[in-house]
Image (cartoon, coloured by chain):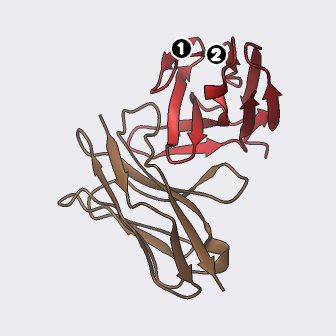
Chain colours: A brown, B red
Amino acid sequence: GNSVTQMEGPVTLSEEAFLTINCTYTATGYPSLFWYVQYPGEGLQLLLKATKADDKGSNKGFEATYRKETTSFHLEKGSVQVSDSAVYFCAPTRISGYALNFGKGTSLLVTP
Amino acid sequence: NAGVTQTPKFQVLKTGQSMTLQCAQDMNHEYMSWYRQDPGMGLRLIHYSVGAGITDQGEVPNGYNVSRSTTEDFPLRLLSAAPSQTSVYFCASSYHRQGLLWVAFFGQGTRLTVV
C-alpha cells in the first residue's frame, strides 16, 4: 500500500519568504502524486498534481516535482502571501486505487 | 455548480444517539468516500464506494455504516454515537479514467460533537 510522510508543522513564515514543505512516500508501483490545500473552515481542494516521474505540477505559484529516485514530492513557493495560510496535504495514490491516502497535513501561517 | 454537498454543517449528539450524515454529488462520479479529520491525525478514510451498490471499509470503519443506493448519494450512519466520534467529517467524490488523473472533490465538512 501507500504511506506518506510530511514535515511536521506548524510552519510560520513572513510574507514573501520561500516555502518548502517536504513529502516523501512509499508505494507499490508508481503512484500519482497530489497536493491538496485546506483553507480555514473549508474542505480540501486540489492544489497541484503529477502523474509520472519528473513531472512538475504547478498552480498559484506553487510547484512540486515528482522525484522517483528519492520518492519525494516536495511543495515549494518562491514568495508566500498571507492568503496562502492553510493546511497542505500530500497524497500519493495508485492509478488503480479507490481512495486517497493523505499525509497528516502541514499547517502554514504567513504573517504580514 | 453544486459539486459535493454535505449536510448538516454542525451537529451535537448525545452518547448513544444515532444519526446520518448526508453526502450528495452532482458530477456523476463513480467513487465516493468518507474521511474524518482529527487534530494531529490528518484525514483518515472511514468507508468508500466504487459505484452504486458497492462499498468497502477504509482505515477506521468501526462505529460507522454506509450504503450506496444511487450514484449521487453516499450517507454515513452512526448507529450509537460515542465521544470518540467527535470529529470533522468530509465526504469526497472522485473520477478515474484510464491513463488520466485521480482527483477528489470535497464537501465543506460536518463538524460533529458527541457529548
Mark 1 closeness class: few <14, some 14–19, many ≥20 residues within 10 Å: few
Classify mark 2: residues with Cα within 10 Å, few (<14), some (14-19) or many (20+). Answer: some
Q: Is residue A106 above or below residue B52?
A: below
Front one among B87 and B101:
B87
Would residue B94 appear left or right of B77 to someone viewing this image?
left
Chain of the residue displaying label 2:
B
| Discs 2, 1 touching: Cβ within 8 Å | yes
Chain of the residue where label 1 is placed in the rendered structure = B
Q: Place residue A34 in its image quadrant.
A: bottom left
Q: Secondary structure at mark 2?
A: loop
Q: Name the residue that disc number 2 marks.
A: B68
Look at 43% across and 49% down and name the residue there.
A103
Asked if residue B103 shows in the view, the reply is yes
Asked which quadrant contains residue A76, the reply is: bottom left
Q: Amino acid at mark 2?
A: Arg
Going by the image, does A100 lie left or right of B64? left
The N terminus of chain A is located in which quarter? Answer: top left
Question: What is the quadrant of the C terminus of chain A in the image?
Answer: bottom right
**Residue corresponding to mark 1:** B54
Question: N-terminal of the two: label 2 or label 1?
Answer: 1
Q: Name the residue: 73% across, 33% down.
A: B112
* Identity of the residue furthest to the left in this view: A69
Q: Amino acid at mark 1?
A: Ile
